[in-house]
Image: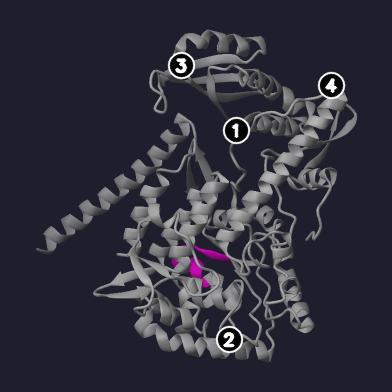
Amino acid sequence: MLHSEESTEEMLDHFQDWRNSGEMAEVNGTTTTTVRPPALRMVIKKSYSIENGYTSRNRSLIEDAKFEHHEHQVQERAIRQHRRQSISQQFGKDIPEEEEESGDLLLLSEWCDQLDSHAKQAIVPSTLVLSLKTGLEILPELLLILQKYQVHVVHIETRSSKKRNGAFDVLVSVRSSVVALLTGAKELKHVKPLAELIILSEQQLSIKDSWFPRRIAELDNCNHLMTKFEPELDHDHPGWSDAAYRKRRQAIADVAFTYRHGDTIPDVEYAPEEVETWRLIYRQLKELQPTHACKPYRDIFTMLEKEGIYAEDKIPQLETVSRFMKSRSGFSLRPAAGLLTARDFLASLAFRVFQCTQYIRHASKPNHSPEPDCVHELLGHVPLLADPYFAQFSQEIGLASLGVSDEEITKLSTLYWFTVEFGLCKEYDTIKAYGAGLLSSFGELMHALSDVPEKRQFDPFLTAIEPYQDQTYQDVYFVADSFEDAKEKFRMYTASIKRPYAVHYDPYTQSIDVLDTAEKLLTRFEDLKTDVDRIHGAMVTLSNAGSVKG
């Protein structure tokens, strides 16, 4: 955790160190570092505090997303400037300030420079999407540029532009080395009739795509970006003046920093005063569950108690809870030292992994915590994440976040806030709570289902831009007809998100497939066809069995 501004060189060093720890290899007798792509990602090194420009007193996923977006922009500008200075020193001439998209090519150059000589010259298939401002008369010039840099064209398709009347989009399949592709792309960017250039490659060379984990084990990399919320930074934090609490909290947080995918989550031995805080909140909330909590939440909470996992006289251990969730919905828990960056937190949901804190709020304020703690996670989130329908909705939010812009991350964080955290749903002729922020807060649960706040029908397009309240109770809550209704509406919303590919979660390999080629789509289609055939066969069997009984 850094509490002061870093120099450009230091920040670049941190960026280089993180962006993939790398592997040492011998190339032509020289030790070099081979960096695993992708690398174009920023690391937030500042603590989330008012002193460092964080705009809110309390931590929330939405404010995290806004803070991260700002810090990413600051760090990108610094890294691009550092790159310009390096090029200027190398060639003895100044590099002028460039447009934002050209700056992305500078970052891609920085990434390319880290590859070993074999990786640079290896021939890889790629696809260029060229959006033209005019007609196809400029196409020969663009193809000549590719030819000049030995970027070999394999296939070309054209279509009328959906953005500009009279213009065209051109899809060009090519084969070339990474260096040749990069060099050709740089010159293409200077052709004025070219409105936009997107690069798709098996080596993930897209200069616009954000990094995201492709395999569940890569969530270990997300965990390395954890930024600890430190009570000593905020005078209003209940634990600010309690040195013993801060030390205890740090000891619990250390469990998360050493955890790796596949490890058994270590148990935490909670102190008697911590269990007493849990008992007080547990009793209060359980009294409200029959009248205020939705039925799926109540049903699974009852299961947790019957299996001896939940009780008022003990704080559940994450490993035990995780095994229960896995058997019910496929979700699992992973220990967290605090709030992840918004992008990393949402990405974890795509793998049906929930990042869960183990420390508990300060005993002086049992009904309030400025950031998530185990009370919020275990009493608020866990029961519904063990419900298959709600688990699917949560995973949909995670999948929608992969590779999208910072602006979209902010909108998705807002959607998460008003649904998973503070959502309401209809249950017959009444309204019940399903949001974890409500189900883990006695006061706000009472407030949300009173006549005081405004209640609106859930519409993700409007919800995503709704201002939210983090200083006191919400003024507005959104009501879904059901989990299925919320999921279908959310799918309509995600279809509007601009992303040059679709993603699919493979539960067998616990990995993300990027569906950006016809071959991948065909494979996915065959998988779906097999599932549909199997379901059809089951329907026929049931139908025949019914006829025999009749």
Is residue 519 in the magenta section?
Answer: no
Q: As drawn, is 199 to the left or to the right of 244?
A: left
**Secondary element at tag 2:** helix
Gap in Å between the C-alphas at discs 3 and 4? 35 Å
The residue nearer to you, when weighing 354 against 186, is: 186
Disc 2 marks a residue whose amino acid type is Trp
Q: Nearer the viewer, mark 3 or mark 1?
A: 3
**Secondary element at tag 3:** loop
Q: Which residues are magenta?
A: 324-333
Residue placed under numbered mark 1 in the picture: 206
Task: Give how far across and how far down residue 272 sits, in percent.
Answer: 67, 91
The residue nearer to you, when weighing 222 against 438, is: 438
Residue placed under numbered mark 3 in the picture: 134
Any part of residue 51 in sight:
yes
Gap in Å between the C-alphas at discs 3 and 1? 24 Å
Residue placed under numbered mark 2 in the picture: 278
* Residue 93 badge: 4
Disc 4 marks a residue whose amino acid type is Lys
Q: Quadrant of the N terminus?
A: bottom right
Disc 3 marks a residue whose amino acid type is Thr
Residue drawn 56% across the image and 84% down it? 367
Question: In the rendered structure, are the residues bearing label 2 and label 4 in contact, judged by CB atoms less than 8 Å apart?
Answer: no
Label 1 Cα crowd, 10 Å radius (few <14 / some 14-19 / many 20+): many
